[in-house]
Amino acid sequence: MSFLDRRLFDLEAYEARARLGPCFVCAFLAGEPDYEHELVYEDADHVAFLDRWPTLPGKVLVAPKAHVEDVVSGFSEDGYLRMMRAVRRVALAVEEVLAPERVYLLSLGSRLGNPHVHWHVAALPPGVPYEQQQFHALMAEHGVADVTPTETARIATELRRRLA
């Protein structure tokens, strides 16, 4: 699979789901079938799961289990440091499994859609031309990674093994 293996993505449907639907992290944690994700890591306070619509293969989302909406002030100092340790742990596993050129870490979302704090751990594959890196590589407007179910399962298994 190469970085260029992408498929179109329905941004309007995604935006409607993000803005009008339930909190996707809380719905996932509650076991709602429409919000299933491939879990790769869990501890008492955090979860990490494969992005359902990854813009890069093996993209992982890391979130607190508690519904927190402020990426910095929503945490105590200790809670924030624990959160970042979980993000780092997942990012190190992503590096091991995917051998990327770089791992991007971002906290995205908005009070208007996907307000639950979460970090994107995205592995930029080697060889991606510079003009297709950084934000370009992360934008669903350019499509999402066309990752087969078999490849997704392999990545999830390897991540779980390294995070165990």
Image (cartoon, rainbow, N blue to C red):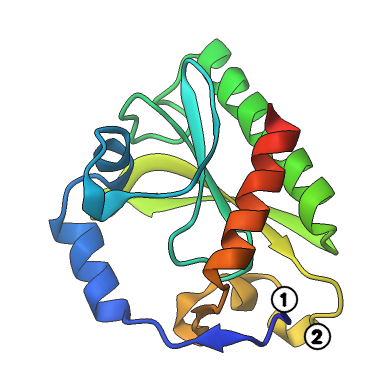
Q: Residue furthest front?
A: 150
Q: Is residue 2 left or right of residue 17?
A: right
Q: What is the x, y in percent for residue 38?
A: 47, 48
Q: Which residue is mark 1?
A: 133
Residue 102 screen position, x and y as percent: 81, 59
The quadrant the C terminus occupies is top right
Relative to residue 80, is residue 147 depicted above or below? below
User: Residue 19 lies in what quarter of the image?
Assistant: bottom left
Q: Which residue is mark 2?
A: 129
Q: Is residue 101 left or right of residue 30?
A: right
What's the residue type where badge 1 is placed?
Gln
* Secondary structure found at label 2: loop
Amino acid type, mark 2: Pro
- x, y (%) of residue 39? 49, 41
Q: Residue at x 45, y 83 (%)?
A: 141
Residues under numbered marks 1 and 2 in contact, where contact means CB atoms less than 8 Å apart: yes
Instruction: Say if 111 sits above or below 40 in the image.
Output: below
Viewport quadrant of the N terminus: bottom right
The CA distance from mark 1 to mark 2 is 7 Å
Residue at the (85%, 58%) spot, across then down: 99
